[in-house]
């Protein structure tokens, strides 16, 4: 196997090893087999392109094109031209899948189901990282920087999961070290020792440009040290990244824009299968309110509505327009004058630990008075905070309507508008047929949509044999509702999601509301709403009454009166009868079961659920430590790729500084020795200290050789300055002023090294800049970018750090540790003598 093929195989293996850290994030690992197959094709294309050979940029472009074609065939073949070529529809499909993937990772718990969208993110991410690693390590022959994308891939998994198995870290580390060793072996096979000077390392005075710089460090050794540094960062970054308690990403609603109608609501997506945060030990108070109505059993506080059903879960429709909060709010959709409504005044005070972006309100609110930056979303009648506005410590007044339709009015409701029917009765084809079949079976004999809705509620709450259980595991994906209907056990999210989906299959407009039940009466007449009062319930639309609440969850909440009233006159015999055993009393002070799930946390329904015993609530917002950790992690991620460039610029500025002393940075040594380690003769320069003049001359020479190194001309310490300059001129294709400047800098170095009375050095900084301009003009675009973004001479930093580390260890070994050991031994002997 040739060196290029071996290196390409190692790059692909390192990518797959790092991708292994993503396996615990999803419930099935089949995706990595698919990613490995596609990555093998992408790598093979790179090997063939380099053997043609194609230009480096073209090689990377061909690999990227092949990756696009592969993803098109796997994920968007139905939209491709001829089943292969990507067109506008393919990119639209990719955009849709990426949006769905971003939403999926925000709503699923770890391990998440391997949906098509999540699989695209995983497989596509592996191909992108593999392309970057292959380009750096194989195409551009620089394996050390390839550790950065591998680090990013591993850090994503380590930061999202609640800890990452050390097995995955060892696999990723082994893959990266294998890549470094393969590159070192390939370099040695072609060039021998890259930096010249075989055998033992010379002493401190043996290097022409400073003490300790003449070490002939093999690329393998350098690669190991850079690898150790990268692996150390790989350990540090996950340590400072905050982990997520639930879901792959914590997806809250996004705040709307500042403009009157600008911005929109973000997606808030509870999930059927999640059951995180169900075992909260305390029922912490999140709200307290006083109200003018005595019928508090119907005073549910709604936070958000979930109106988009994708077959497996419900979420808010993203991009809904928002406006300034009107005063008063518009008349609720579908509410007719003939339906009884009672005005209710409510004063609400949120606790200091309750912070979310949606305002809990009785439905339908008619007027809201609150300070701060809040916006109104008309479709769901939700009040949304803007610019980090939350409910923390908020106090507000709400005027709402207590809508009290009769069973007869609901039974006689006319057909809803076509717009509502189109939008709120959508059922994806992925929903199993058993859901619609069960809905028709349960509602058989119902004479109208109202009776169908009540029969569904009765079946879930009383007659169907369902059991309320917060410990249930009902799965996820398109079959989640079917599994729930079969298992017949779950909590409020399962019941509300399923009833709303079944109502849609019957042609009844339906959505899901998330919020709080009325809470617990207090001795002072107020109502206390705790974290365990978080709840989800379905809302069905009936023309004349508007969006109407139902309560299918057994033992939770209170069923509305219009669902337990006596059968309307003339109705079908199969209509539901009253349920005397269900009261409209407020919820009990305490509940044995916790109804608030990880889904509701994501919907901002019960932020206080994340509270821990004896500690502050997680709803207090990000703590200072978390913010600092995220800032440090982001700063590291942003700065790591540009650190070599920043270091190189700083070193260049110091070396080409005007006459005057300055401090040296990492990787720099005092310019006090010439080529071969010869002592430098004092160069008497006009108006300049002789020692400083010598240091400035040699600093300019080092900058010239390092600049040439950045453009691929390796330094050769065995040559004289004149021969080294001639080699740089020849290898860098310099001519005219740039070639003459290189010769003049070399002459200045020889004057400083050998002449008894050296001539003035002149403007060496300008000469070096002229040489750099010539190297830049003669190099290709890729070489210019490499010289700026990933300069090869930055290896001096690793060498300097290694020397300082070795020196520190040597001092500790021979100095302080030995002295402490001797003192301890002496004290021990003295104590024995006294004993």
Image (cartoon, rainbow, N blue to C red):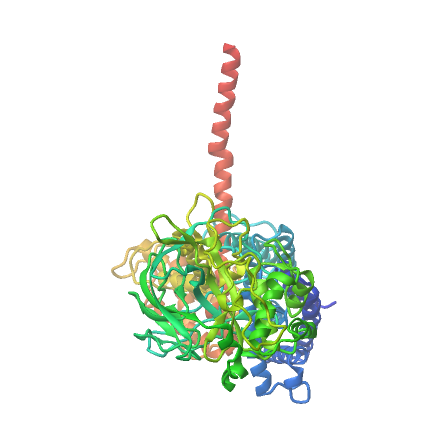
Residue found at the far right of this picture: 1
Determine the residue positioned at 34% across, 75% down: 329
* Res 258 quadrant in image: bottom left
Q: Is residue 830 above or below residue 796?
A: above
Q: Does residue 734 appear in this view?
A: yes
Residue found at the far front of this picture: 569
Numbered marks: total: 0
Q: Residue 540: image x %, image y %?
A: 52, 73
Residue found at the far left of this picture: 687
Between residues 517 and 818, which one lies in front from this camera angle? 517
Q: Quadrant of the N terminus?
A: bottom right
Q: Is residue 60 above or below residue 14?
A: below
Q: Is residue 772 above or below residue 589?
A: below
Between residues 235 and 335, which one lies in front from this camera angle? 335
Q: Is residue 149 left or right of residue 331?
A: right
Q: Residue 11: image x %, image y %?
A: 64, 65
Q: Residue 268: image x %, image y %?
A: 49, 68
Q: Is residue 73 left or right of residue 622?
A: right
Q: Is residue 58 above or below residue 434?
A: below
* Res 573 quadrant in image: bottom right
Between residues 716 and 564, which one lies in front from this camera angle? 564
Q: Does residue 733 appear in this view?
A: no
Q: Residue 633: image x %, image y %?
A: 46, 58
Q: Is residue 611 left or right of residue 141?
A: left
Determine the residue positioned at 50% across, 10% down: 834
């Amino acid at each position: 196997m040739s060196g290029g093929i071996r290196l390409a195989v190692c790059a692909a293996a390192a990518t797959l090893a790092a991708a292994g850290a993503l396996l615990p994030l999803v419930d099935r690992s089949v995706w990595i087999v698919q990613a490995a197959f596609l990555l093998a094709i992408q790598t093979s294309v790179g090997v063939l392109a380099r053997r043609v050979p194609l230009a480096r940029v073209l090689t990377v472009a061909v690999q990227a094109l092949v990756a696009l074609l592969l993803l098109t065939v796997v994920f968007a073949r139905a939209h491709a031209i001829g089943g292969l070529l990507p067109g506008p529809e393919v990119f639209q499909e990719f955009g849709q899948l990426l949006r769905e993937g971003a939403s999926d990772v925000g709503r699923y718990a770890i391990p998440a189901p391997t949906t098509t969208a999540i699989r695209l993110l995983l497989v596509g991410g592996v191909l992108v990282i593999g392309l970057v690693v292959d380009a750096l390590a194989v195409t551009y022959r620089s394996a050390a920087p390839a550790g950065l994308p591998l680090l990013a891939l591993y850090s994503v998994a380590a930061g999202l999961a609640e800890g990452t198995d050390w097995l995955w870290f060892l696999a990723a580390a082994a893959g990266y070290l294998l890549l470094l060793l393969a590159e070192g072996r390939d370099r040695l096979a072609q060039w021998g020792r890259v930096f010249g000077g075989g055998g033992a390392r010379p002493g401190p005075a043996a290097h022409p440009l400073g003490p300790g710089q003449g070490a002939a460090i093999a690329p393998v050794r350098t690669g190991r040290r850079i690898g150790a540094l990268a692996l150390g960062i790989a350990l540090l970054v996950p340590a400072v990244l905050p982990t997520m308690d639930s879901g792959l990403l914590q997806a809250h609603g996004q705040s709307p824009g500042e403009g009157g109608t600008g911005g929109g609501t973000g997606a808030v997506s509870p999930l059927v299968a999640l059951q995180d945060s169900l075992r909260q030990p305390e029922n912490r108070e999140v709200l307290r309110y006083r109200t003018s109505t005595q019928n508090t059993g119907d005073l549910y506080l709604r936070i958000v509505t979930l109106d988009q059903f994708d077959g497996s879960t419900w979420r808010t429709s993203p991009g809904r327009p928002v406006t300034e909060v009107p005063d008063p709010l518009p008349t609720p959709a579908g509410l007719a004058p003939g339906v009884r409504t009672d005005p209710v005044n409510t004063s609400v005070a949120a606790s200091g630990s309750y912070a979310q972006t949606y305002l809990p309100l009785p439905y339908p609110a008619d007027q809201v008075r609150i300070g701060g930056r809040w916006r109104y979303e008309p479709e769901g009648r939700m009040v949304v905070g803007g610019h980090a506005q939350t409910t923390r410590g908020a106090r507000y007044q709400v005027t709402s309507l207590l809508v009290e339709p009769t069973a007869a009015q609901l039974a006689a409701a006319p057909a809803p508008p076509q717009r509502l029917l189109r939008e709120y009765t959508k059922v994806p084809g992925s929903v199993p047929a058993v859901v619609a079949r069960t809905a028709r079976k349960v509602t058989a004999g119902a004479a109208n949509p109202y009776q169908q809705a009540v029969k569904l509620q009765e079946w879930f709450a009383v007659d169907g044999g369902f059991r309320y259980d917060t410990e249930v595991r009902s799965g996820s994906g398109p079959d989640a509702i079917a599994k729930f209907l079969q298992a017949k056990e779950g909590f409020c999210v399962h019941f509300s999601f399923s009833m709303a989906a079944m109502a849609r299959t019957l042609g009844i407009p339906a959505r899901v509301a998330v919020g709080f039940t009325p809470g617990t009466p207090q001795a002072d007449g107020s109502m206390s709403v705790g974290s365990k009062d978080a709840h989800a319930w379905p809302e069905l639309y009936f023309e004349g009454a508007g969006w109407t609440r139902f309560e299918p969850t057994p033992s939770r909440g209170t069923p509305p009166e219009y669902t337990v009233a006596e059968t309307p006159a003339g109705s079908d015999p199969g209509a539901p009868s009253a349920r005397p055993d269900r009261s409209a009393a407020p919820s009990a002070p305490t509940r044995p079961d916790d109804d608030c799930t990880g889904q509701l946390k994501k919907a901002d329904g019960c932020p206080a659920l994340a509270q821990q015993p004896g500690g502050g609530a997680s709803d207090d917002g990000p703590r200072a430590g978390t913010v600092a950790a995220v800032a440090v992690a982001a700063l590291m991620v942003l700065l790591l790729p540009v650190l070599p460039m920043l270091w190189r610029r700083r070193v260049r500025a110091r070396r080409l500084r005007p006459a005057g002393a300055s401090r040296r940075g990492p990787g720099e040594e005092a310019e006090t020795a010439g080529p071969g380690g010869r002592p430098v003769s004092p160069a008497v320069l006009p108006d300049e200290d002789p020692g400083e003049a010598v240091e400035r001359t040699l600093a300019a020479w080092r900058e010239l050789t390092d600049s040439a190194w950045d453009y691929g001309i390796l330094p050769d310490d065995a040559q004289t300055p004149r021969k080294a300059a001639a080699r740089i001129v020849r290898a860098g294709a310099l001519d005219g002023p740039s070639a003459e400047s290189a010769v003049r800098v070399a002459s200045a170095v020889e004057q400083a090294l050998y002449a008894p009375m050296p001539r003035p050095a002149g403007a060496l900084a300008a000469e070096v800049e002229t040489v750099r301009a010539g190297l830049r003009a003669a190099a290709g675009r890729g070489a210019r970018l490499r010289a700026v973004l990933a300069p090869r001479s930055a290896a001096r930093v690793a060498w300097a750090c290694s020397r300082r580390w070795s020196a520190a260890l040597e001092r500790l070994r021979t100095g302080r540790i030995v002295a402490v050991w001797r003192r301890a031994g002496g004290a021990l002997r003295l104590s024995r003598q006294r004993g």
